[in-house]
Image (cartoon, rainbow, N blue to C red):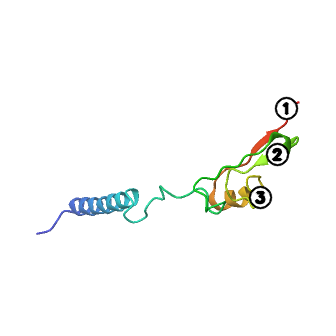
Amino acid sequence: MLVPAKMDDLCREVAVFAMGAAVGYLLCYGKVLPWKRDSPVNLSVDKENPKVVNNIDVEEIGDFKALCRCWRSKQFPFCDGSHTEHNAATGDNVGPVIIKRKV
């Protein structure tokens, strides 16, 4: 039995759609490419402590200080510009917290 050309095209389109839907489902629900939902922010700073806390006296700050928010700084808790490389590599837009003395 010959299948009309339109029916053949319809079967092919349904098959392509089904494959696309299956791939999309697997990608979205982590079966093929699992999402990193629980990835840590702090990769290297003071890892032996259960919680990193830094206290800074106001007198130590002076007129201006930039504090790190990307956790990549070698001078943590102060910013050394490491976020620039991190942003270029990941497409992120993180920057420092800037503290200035109010005059």
Q: Earlier in the sequence, mark 1 or mark 2?
A: 2
Give the labeled residue for mark 2.
65
Give the labeled residue for mark 3.
75
Q: Earlier in the sequence, mark 2 or mark 3?
A: 2
Q: Earlier in the sequence, mark 1 or mark 3?
A: 3
Q: Position of residue 4 (x, y in %)?
A: 19, 62
Amino acid beneath label 1:
Lys
Q: Is residue 73 above or below residue 65?
A: below
Q: Position of residue 80 (x, y in %)?
A: 78, 57
Residue at image location 43% in from the left, 62% down from the top: 34
Assign the C terminus to one quadrant of the image: top right
Q: Secondary structure under badge 3?
A: loop
Graded by Cα atoms within 10 Å as few (under 14), some (14 to 19) or many (20 or more), the crowding at tag 2 reads: some
Give the labeled residue for mark 1.
102
Q: Nearer the viewer, residue 19 or 91?
A: 91
Residue at image location 73% in from the left, 52% down from the top: 77
Graded by Cα atoms within 10 Å as few (under 14), some (14 to 19) or many (20 or more), the crowding at tag 1 reads: few
19 lies left or right of 27: left
